[in-house]
Amino acid sequence: MPNEYPARRRSGWWLRNPRYFMFQMREIGGVVSALYGLVLLNLLMQLSAGESAYNSFLTTLRTPPVLYLNLVFFGFVVWHAITWFMLIGKAQPIRLTREPLPWKIVFGINLILWFVVSGAVVYLIFGGM
Amino acid sequence: MAEREIVFRVTRYRPTAGGRPTFQDYRIPVRDDMVVLDGLNYIKDHVDPSLTFRWSCRMGICGSCGANVDGRPRLTCGTYIRDLGKRIVKVEPLSNFPILKDLVVDFDDFLNKLASVKPHIIRKDWGDWTKEYTQYPEDLEAYRQQSLCINCMLCYAACPVVGASPEFVGPAASALALRYIRDTRDEGAAERLARLNTKTGVWECTFVGECSVVCPKDVDPAGAIQTLKFLATQRHMRRLLMPGAR
Amino acid sequence: MFWSLFSAGGFVTAFLFPITLFLLFFAAPFGLWPSDPAAFAAFAARWAGPLVRLFFFVLIGGSLFHGTHRLRYLLIDAGIRGPALEALLDLILNGIAVVGTLAALYVVVRGWFF
């Protein structure tokens, strides 16, 4: 029909609704985590390249501008983690119980699990305090 | 009951005139027990009979009165004006659909998508027509949630992926596909997954989750799509590990 | 198949990334930790453990598969669409993930066998 007004999405769609905005931040957080994957890869390569190479890379990471950029990126990664825990409860493709659990309970369990896992990482991978 | 005056800012689009849709303001008296659809009907009956919108049952089951109210897709019959707490209520047609006139959108595209997932029971052999196909309460429970869909298309209006990619099969059609896949009487899972396990099928979904937020019947299409992604992956892995398996 | 890796990567990045980044990047500069977990001597000593190597391999591989998948959809949403462009996108992004993971594997295995 020639007289229909066609559907088109506005370019700022993800700014118009807080949930859309949170979604977009979550997706960016996922991409940021891949960037960190590359940073870690580089860190390990410098590690095997020797002490001076490793230390100079570490110093670069700790210069103020990089450090504060890291802090922002870290926020994205944490947000990504929290939203991921929310999603697990909402998706639940694999059901462990007969009735699907409310997502908030799954979210809570995941948060607790997150702290436990983080604690385990501190001791098993980084040798405690 | 006390009456107040409120402004309804409603999208107008005249197909014969063409151009862009515009807003028209109507100042109308409202009471606390009025829903947005009552406001629209007041305008049509008392102010401007040319205003066009769809509605039928007034009780949230026919699924025809959906519109974007204050930017969010809702059933106008289930949205109380007082709950919006606004002096100006903005009523626009559902987004992501072409506009036919005013608040009426063209949803042929949705109907084609719905038909593409074969929303009916498929059996290879119907056999004896007099036989009963027994369903236990648990069998019903497996698909009851998805079966509550009323095809109101609010989820399509809420989905930014539908907005960006018109080919995407979309939330409600996916949820209804899962409803039949989960039915113990049905044997059509493979046919439906053939449509859904494609680029424009469930894999286009990025799990924004807004479809499940706006759904008036708690069908949870977002969850259904995730389950379908999982089913499709499971099938794929099974075929990879055991060639010849279905 | 890439979706399975994406979701596995999602779990990895969600559960393991925040604490790792905190310890490596922020603990020492902000003085929030008694020792510097990223100091060369300490890090090199722990690097000998197979669990530590496996941990970093999973971390890098998981985050790459997860992140490239998300980037793919972000770019498609931003308007990079059409069969040819999407195929190119798949090639580049999955390529980054696969090559990155193989590089991580190499770094992790090196020093054990050669």
Image (tube, coloured by chain):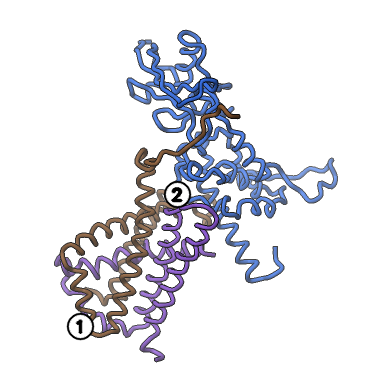
Chain colours: A brown, B blue, C purple
Counting from the top left corner in percent of width and height, residue A17 is at 37, 39
At a point 28% along the width and 74% down the height, the residue shown is A123
> Which of the chains bears the disc numbered 2?
C
At a point 85% along the width and 45% down the height, the residue shown is B128
At a point 32% along the width and 54% down the height, the residue shown is A79
Vertical arrangement, residue B150 with respect to residue B54, above or below:
below
Q: Is residue C112 left or right of residue B107?
A: left
Q: Quadrant of residue C19?
A: bottom left
Task: Name which residue type carries label 2.
Answer: Gly
At a point 25% along the width and 57% down the height, the residue shown is A72
Q: Which mark is residue A110?
A: none
Which residue lies under the disc numbered 2? C79
Which residue lies under the disc numbered 1? A52
> Which of the chains bears the disc numbered 1?
A
Counting from the top left corner in percent of width and height, residue C110 is at 38, 86
What's the distance in space between the residues labelled 1 and 2, CA to CA?
44 Å
Q: Quadrant of residue B5?
A: top left
Vertical arrangement, residue C17 with respect to residue B85, above or below:
below
